Amino acid sequence: MHELAHDDTGGTGPLVVMLPGAGDLRSEYRFLVDRLSGAGHRVVTADLPGHGDSPTAAEYTVASTAAAIVGLIEALDGGPAVVVGCSFAPAAAVWAAAERPDLIRGMVAISPHLHADDSLKGRFLNAATRALMRGSWSGGLWAKLYAGFYKTTPPSDLDSELNRIRTMLHDSARRRAVRETLTAGRDGVAERAAAVQLPTLIVFGSLDDHFADPVAEAEAVSSLLRGERLVVEGAGHYPQVERPEAVGEAIEAFLEELD
């Protein structure tokens, strides 16, 4: 399995692998890396398959992304790892943990989409995403949607991040990667989540409009994964960017408990 593009702080501390949401880049964790590495952890931030600097792939499913996560941890030769994932990535992390429990010792699930929306509205949104993320206009459209995911405190460098995302989406192969990752099915995720015995921290923003009721969703995911939960007041889909102090403190405390 190919190795995902990544940045590695190095060192011999416990390994933490951080994966962004679909349509985003590994820089999503730019406000947490120094804090966690300063606490003694080896922190690796990686792009999802076909995103950023990672190689494109034949398919972009939960299972294939899980295989890429396993391949990365094996290549780093520093596991078992704690996997931190946002949005799409926690589903793949759950799958990877079910397949290779020897490689993953804990998980932080931020704004996790662990199940697909099979309602008429959900199916319509998936069809619209597949159609709208095909053309050269995709970068501008996604950037506009992405900016709206920050509800209270957009990061000061948001414009530069949006430019990087637009650049990624100029490439038709990467548009396909983003499109298929955004609309990937979740069949089998809930069953694997129920079977996995893994210390987990679940983090949601209280204003995350990806969910009808983010607080209720946090409770449901916490019950499914049998994990701790944190709801960050005033944050949207990326609480680790809007409220890095609160999220960083919670992740650091979680990692300390594991160590």
Image (cartoon, grey):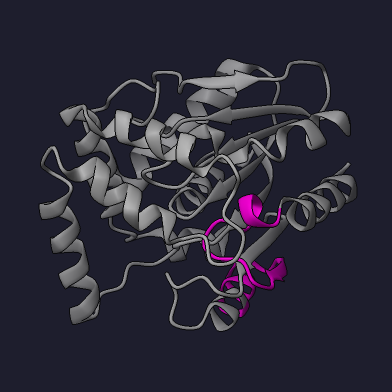
What residue range appears in magenta?
219-243
Question: Foreground residue, 46 or 31?
Answer: 31
Q: Is residue 170 left or right of residue 14?
A: left
Q: Is residue 61 magenta?
A: no
Where does residue 59 sit, x and y in percent of width and height? Answer: 23, 36
Query: Is the residue 163 above or below the residue 56 in the image?
Result: below
Q: Quadrant of the C terminus?
A: top right
- Identify the residue at image location x=31%, y=35%: 166
Residue 115: name its quadrant.
Answer: bottom left
Q: Quadrant of the N terminus?
A: top left
Q: Is residue 193 left or right of residue 1?
A: right
Residue 17 visible from this viewpoint: yes
Residue 65: name its quadrant.
Answer: top left
Question: Foreground residue, 122 or 150?
Answer: 150
- Identify the residue at image location x=42%, y=41%: 24
Question: Foreground residue, 22 or 97?
Answer: 22
Where does residue 246 sit, x and y in percent of width and height? Answer: 78, 58
Question: Foreground residue, 145 or 49?
Answer: 145
Residue 108 visible from this viewpoint: no
Where does residue 239 sit, x and y in percent of width and height? Answer: 62, 58
Count the marks: 0
- Identify the residue at image location x=22%, y=37%: 175
Query: Is the residue 106 above or below the residue 237 in the image?
Result: above
- Identify the residue at image location x=57%, y=54%: 154
Q: Is residue 227 magenta?
A: yes
Where does residue 187 sit, x and y in percent of width and height? Answer: 32, 61
